[in-house]
Image (cartoon, rainbow, N blue to C red):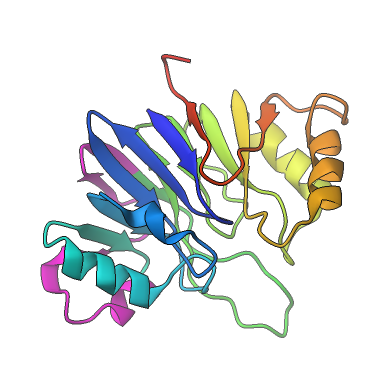
Amino acid sequence: MLLTKFGHACVRVEKDGRRLVIDPGGLTEPQALDGADAVLVTHEHFDHFSEERLRRAAADNPGLRIWADSSVAGQLDGLGTRVTAVGEGAAFGAAGFDVKVHGAWHAVIHPDIPRITNVGFLIDDVLFHPGDALTVPDAAVGTLLLPVHAPWSTTGQLIDYVREVGPRDAYAIHDGALNDVGTTVLGGILGEHGPGTTARYHRLTPGASAQIGDSE
């Protein structure tokens, strides 16, 4: 499986000539959706979901299918059966990938800010994208997409999260608001010079790719 990082929280995975895109939002490079066969969306926040871009991609590709949490699916009216709302415990096939849904809620930002729904996607029992939550799947995870910078978490929580999930590799996502200094600091703490996790820590620059899965 080939993993490609795009802006902020978006990634694309490719296998056997099929392309699956997760969380193409307002901070994502437009080319992320080029050639996409399917799209997964964890929740409705603008940095994960762009209705305009998804509708444009669906118009350009009549075969494009979208799976998303209920709030996002409700905003994509008019696309009919091409959009499927999914929640915790769902399992389905998307563009040749096996997908399982874990989690139900966005992380708490502040008690005065209402919570929204958020689902995480486990792809081929290898790659997990949690969206905006520190969801721990009840399954082994080889590669964790780690949201490294958000108003709802601390670096200490991220360390504990990686330890609890126990992946072999963690790839940074949700880093669009970080400058070079912040990226370096986080890399030092979450990497081999920090207090330690079970995972090797990586950060791909936008457009860069890495091979993940059993062939690593």
Q: Is residue 108 above or below residue 176?
A: below
Q: Is residue 84 above or below residue 15?
A: below
The quarter holding residue 113 reads: bottom right
Q: Is residue 152 left or right of residue 59?
A: right
Q: Is residue 8 left or right of residue 28?
A: right
Residue 157 covered by magenta stretch? no
Residue ranking furthest to the top: 215
Q: Position of residue 175 (x, y in %)?
A: 67, 54
Q: Position of residue 133 (x, y in %)?
A: 60, 57
Q: Report the residue at 81% width, 55% height from top.
A: 154
Specify start and end residues of the magenta stretch as a single range: 72-99
Q: Report the residue at 60% width, 27% height from top.
A: 169
- Most foreground residue, 138 or 35: 35
Q: Is residue 99 left or right of residue 164?
A: left
The quarter holding residue 214 reads: top left
- On the question of residue 124 being in view, the answer is yes
Q: Position of residue 2 (x, y in %)?
A: 40, 30
Looking at the rendered image, the quarter that the N terminus falls into is top left
Q: Report the residue at 56% width, 46% height from top.
A: 206
How many numbered marks are there?
Answer: 0
The quarter holding residue 190 reads: top right
- Most foreground residue, 112 or 129: 129
Q: Position of residue 168 (x, y in %)?
A: 60, 23
Q: Report the residue at 48% width, 15% height from top.
A: 216
- On the question of residue 88 being in view, the answer is no
Q: Is residue 37 above or below residue 213?
A: below
